[in-house]
Amino acid sequence: MAGQREAVVRSLVQSARLNGNDPSAYLKDVPTRLPTHLNRHIDELLSHRWQTAGH
C-alpha cells in the first residue's frame, strides 16, 4: 500500500514538472482547493491546466 501511495505522489510531482509547474506549489494548492472547487471544473486542477489561485 505504501508503495502505491509513493507511486501516486511521484507521478503527480513528475506531471507537474513536465507541465512547467512547481511541484511543491501544485501539491500545496490543489488539496486546499478541492473541497470548494466545483466538480464540473475539476479539470482545471489537472497539472496541464492548473494555475495558482491568483492567476
Image (cartoon, helix red, strand yellow):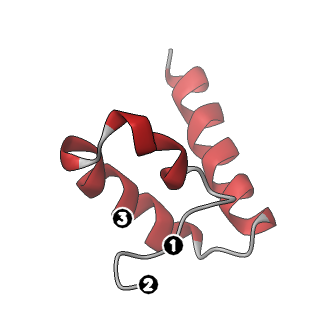
Secondary structure under badge 1? loop
x 60%, y 34%: residue: 8
- What residue does disc 2 label? 55
In the depicted structure, whether residue 43 falls above or below residue 29: above
- Look at label 3 and name its amino acid: Asp
Most extreme residue toward the top is: 1
Q: CA distance from mark 3 to mark 1?
A: 9 Å
Foreground residue, 6 or 48? 48
x 27%, y 55%: residue: 33
Most extreme residue toward the left is: 36
Foreground residue, 38 or 30? 38
| Side of 19 relative to 34 (left or right) | right
- What residue does disc 1 label? 51
| Side of 6 relative to 38 (left or right) | right
The quarter holding residue 3 reads top right
Residue 18 horizontal/vertical position (percent): 80, 64
Secondary structure under badge 3? helix
In the depicted structure, whether residue 1 falls above or below residue 55: above
Secondary structure under badge 2? loop
- Look at label 1 and name its amino acid: Gln
Question: Mark 2 or mark 3: which comes first in sequence?
Answer: 3
Label 1–label 2 contact, CB within 8 A? yes
Residue 26 horizontal/vertical position (percent): 49, 65
Foreground residue, 27 or 5? 27
- What residue does disc 3 label? 29
Question: Mark 3 or mark 1: which comes first in sequence?
Answer: 3
Q: Residues within 10 Å of mark 2 (few under 14, many from 20)?
A: few
In the depicted structure, whether residue 20 falls above or below residue 54: above
Residue 55 horizontal/vertical position (percent): 44, 84
x 45%, y 42%: residue: 42
Badge nearest the viewer, 3 or 1: 1
